[in-house]
Image (cartoon, rainbow, N blue to C red):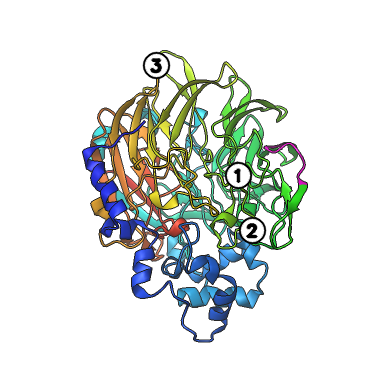
Amino acid sequence: MRIVTAAFAAVVAAVTAGSALAAAAEPVAAQERARGLLDPPPMDDSPGMRVYAASCAECHSGQRTVRAPGLTTLGAMTPRAVLSSLEGGRMRRHGEDLTADERRAVAEWLTGDTLVETRLPSSAFCASAPSEEGVVHWSGWGGGAGETGFADAARAGLTAADLPNLELAWAFGFPDVSQVRSKPAVVDDRVIVGSAYGEVYSIDLESGCVHWVFAGDAAVRGAIAIGDGPDGGQSAFFADFRTNVYAIDATSGALHWRAVAGTHADHVVTGSVTVHEGRVFVPLSSMEIISAGDPAYECCTSSGGVAAFSAETGEPLWEFQTVADEPRHVGENEAGTRLFAPSGAPVWSSPTVDAARGLLYIGTGENYTRPTTGGSDAITALDMETGEARWTFQGRQDDAWNMSCLSPRFQNCPAPTGPDHDFGMAPIIVTAEDGSQLLIAGQKSGMVWALDPDSDGELVWARRVGTGSSLGGIHWGLASDGRRAYVPNVDNPFAIISDPRSGESTQMNAGDPPTPGVYALELAGGEVLWHAPPDPSVCQDRAGCMPFFSPAPTAIEGAVLAGSLDGHMRAFSTEDGSVLWDVDTAREFETVNGVPGRGGAIDGPGPVVARGYILVNSGYDLFSQMPGNLLLAWRVRR
């Protein structure tokens, strides 16, 4: 399917012609090239410069992609953010080869700042204690049952008619961070949200003051889920990047228990936990996708999966691996390093509970090595009691890829190279107005799939809304109000993968123009009802700006709210796609907690709408996007 509106034809022309839009949308490469920042760093002989030149420059200077941000993007981060990435984040494998002094030196050299840890002032904390217990208004990735991302008027506290009357209630600044990725839970008058350094905050919904702070061990990237805890009261459940799983008291922040989900050295948690009837389900992905960029790394031996724990005690119940077979030695690369397969098929997103059928749905990513498996780029249904697979629908066969495929040395890159077309989002269970149900999921290929949950995932319909890329297509999710499905399509032209050996595109539909924007699909057959393209003018003269819709959306009655990599949060009419509300978050804000605040790209989770508030994360520095450190709250003007 090809949809190219007149409005978007200008976007395509601008991108392909290398205009100002292309300079802005390209991962700041044009700006860096103009400033000479793609050349080797100045030879100031500082320790940080020497570390960068020896260990970092190959990927972050010269021949690089949106997966490896350049010096401009790195320089916009805080030293603590760079250090955190090297010690426990995406660059942990590379950071292990450096000493503590070297990691600190390169973090300070890249950012031009001294490493400090900002602490909240006493004025940021509430004068009174939070309420005991309370009604859960939003929990987990999609807000509740089916993970549809829809909040009706009773739960949301507002509808499309209220959007013109919104005002900013408060802005909360996360200290020292350059991205905001955790999705808040809302329990009565409290917002519970994680941060890039492992802190979990309980914030007053009305004023933005802080009730308590819990310190985890690593970044909390996923949503906070609320459920019954060990004492019968409400607990907040979440996992950090290092696969630690936590249950803390939702009122006081006291720790009930902590467990470890990862069973492989490179396992990480990038998605959100799901809680249901005394069980906590934890998605497992892996940083082997990055480790593979090192020719000396024996790639690859990890499998994606899901681990289940008792919500009461933290006791492990079962683990499902997406790659069932044990990895075996399959050869050596050109450096003489042993290679292993099968591997990969990570679970980047949140599992979805189907209580009526006793099933848990997951989406998986590509294999890291060959041979590939039938569980990659797939939707799989698991038995919630046992963790056994009931059925699998594979959206793309034979997709093998890792970060070595972006390196000039690519010794660990599988041949042929796949397009990296994961299911990066959580599947959603949609109940139509006639009572029928569909399981709907979007893929980074630009495909939307509707499956029959009563017929072992039999395909009902499929709809292509874009050309896709390694960053989407459909990247983080879609939403439905039971009338339509609302689908953000990225179609980032700068994230399309080519086979490093042949130079040919790995896309299934290479040559088709990108068609980014927000789409409304009817549920019966997936027909496109309307398409709202991006506004390229927003990115003029804004470094690192990309006019693409990547994050998950949220639907309310009459409107779908969709953030963009250009920093705007927009609300579109569910009837015709017209813009009902548009606010630019990529600017400085005065924060309620005294931390200097600036918004940036909006990516990852969709906004939370509850009790008349719209909560929006702003700032996302991965993939050369605009950094930021804000949680923003809007409400109807009083």
Q: Which residue is under mark 3?
A: 433
Q: Which residue is under mark 1?
A: 400
Which contiguous range is marked in magenta? 319-328
- Compared across the picture, whether 71 is left or right of 86 comes to left
Spatial CA span between label 3 and label 1: 39 Å
Q: Which mark is residue 313?
A: none
Q: Determine the residue located farthest toward the front in the rendered image.
A: 502
Do we see residue 167 in this rendering?
Answer: no
Nearest to N terminus: mark 3 or mark 1: 1
Query: Mainly helix, strand or loop, the magenta region?
Result: loop
Tag in front: 1 or 2: 2
**Residue shown at the point (41%, 13%) measured from the top left:** 434
- Compared across the picture, whether 455 is left or right of 428 comes to right
Q: Determine the residue located farthest toward the top in the rendered image.
A: 434
Q: Is residue 325 above or below residue 175?
A: above
- The reply to whether the magenta stretch includes residue 145 is no
Spatial CA span between label 1 and label 2: 14 Å
Nearest to N terminus: mark 1 or mark 2: 1
Q: Identify the image quadrant of residue 473.
A: top left
**Residue shown at the point (48%, 45%) measured from the top left:** 183
Hey, what amino acid is under mark 3?
Glu
Spatial CA span between label 2 and label 3: 52 Å
Hey, what amino acid is under mark 1?
Ala
Nearest to N terminus: mark 2 or mark 3: 2
Q: Identify the image quadrant of residue 574.
A: top left
Image position, residue 474 (x, y; %): 44, 39
- Name the image quarter holding the C terminus: top left
- Please tell me whether mark 1 sits on a helix, a strand or a loop: loop
- Please tell me whether mark 3 sits on a helix, a strand or a loop: loop
Do we see residue 388 in this rendering?
Answer: yes
Q: Which residue is under mark 2?
A: 411
